[in-house]
Image (cartoon, grey):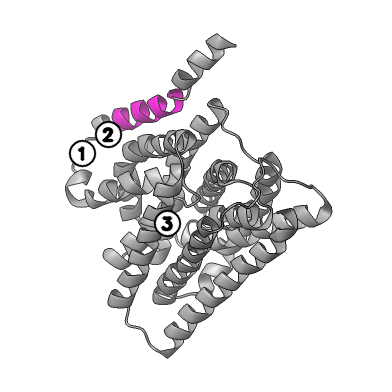
Amino acid sequence: MKSSLNTRPHLDLVFITLVWIVWLVITVGANRWALFVDDWFMPVTMAFGSFVAGSTSQGGGAVAFPVMTLGFNIDPRGARDFSMMIQSIGMTSATMVILWRRIPIEKTALLIAGLSGAVGIVFGLEVVQFWFESTPTKVFFVSLWLAFGVALWTINRVKGSIKRESLADRNPGTLICLALAGFVGGTVSGLLGSGLDIFVFAALVLGFRVCETVATPTSVILMASNSVVGFLWRLSGGGGEAIAPEIWNYWWVCIPVVAIGAPMGARFISNRGHLFVVRLLLVVIVAQALGAVFIVSFDGPLIALAVATFGLGVALFLLLWRWGRRYA
């Protein structure tokens, strides 16, 4: 047993090493170093984004999407594709760390929400994404994450509530709730590139009182698998137009960064309290909202969309919290 424990931290470097070797061979062979000259801002962004992806309930796309759409005026669908593509690398690397280090996860939520989330992301890619134009998608993203920020703030203000290492019950009602959270979250992922993670995290923590140290790695694995499903679906020709060439370039220059950043985040959260990261996330979420206020030209319909999304999001999280009191 001692030998296994001593070797496990080395085993979780296998995936990262393989990613780096393949990336270096192709980059050197095809002489792709010039991509860094024009696209340097994306590895810088994802150095932080991948750490967030590994250490919190938000995928790296939660950082990449607003930076790309608000900061660099990249089309939201391209930013969505990039988020899924890069999370397929970074959050899969973080998943390897979580599994090999045996960090506690909620397996029932992983199975139920993972399956329904896979259906949801396909539904989002094939149906829901075509309901939104570019600017409304940006506003929807910022408003939804601002509502999530309010939920995070609420969670960390409540003291003394009972937290569990796993679900207290696995009755039909619990499974249906997880399936719904997975489907809705997956649908949002099909629109924004991430979403399954925060919806399932909210259901586990707010609704079922599962502790954040279990809900966070569970949401990381879920978002990794959901990103892979979405990426493969796009590669197969689904979800509209093919992935744009510049998105492939962004993805390529970020691969070596996220392959390390996300596992670092997973290691960080497994050994330390999450309060610092939560506060940092709240700062990022507020910064996203302020950025949208100054960058987006809001008219009546956009204001209505922002208010409705934020209001419904907060109401959903508070409803989960009240419903979850039966588990406290």
Residue 260 locus on image (x, y percent): 36, 34
Quarter of the view holding residue 23 = top left
Q: Position of residue 166 (x, y in %)?
A: 69, 42
Asked which quadrant contains residue 253, the reply is top left
Element carrying mark 3: helix
Q: Secondary structure at mark 2?
A: helix
Residue 224 at x, y percent in the picture: 52, 44
Please state which amino acid type lies under the numbered disc 1: Trp
Q: Check disc 2 and give the amino acid type.
A: Thr
The reply to whether callout 2 and callout 1 are in contact (CB within 8 Å) is yes
Residue drawn at x 36%, y 38% is: 261
Q: Amino acid at mark 3?
A: Ala
Q: Residue at x 30, y 27 (%)?
A: 25
Expressed as whole percent of the image width and height from the top left, the position of residue 254 reads: 32, 43
The residue wearing badge 3 is 62
Q: CA distance from mark 2 to mark 1?
A: 7 Å
Work out how far the residue at label 1 is from the one at label 3, CA to CA, in angstroms.
Answer: 27 Å
Closer-to-camera residue (149/142): 149
| Mark 2 or 1, nearer chain start | 2
Task: Report helix, strand or loop for mark 1.
Answer: loop
- Circle 2 is placed at which residue position? 27
| Above-or-below relation of 150 to 309 | above
Span of residues in magenta: 13-27
- Quick one: quadrant of the C terminus? bottom right
Residue 270 visible in the picture: yes
Mark carried by residue 33: 1
Q: Is residue 20 above or below residue 310?
A: above
Outermost residue toward the top in this view = 3
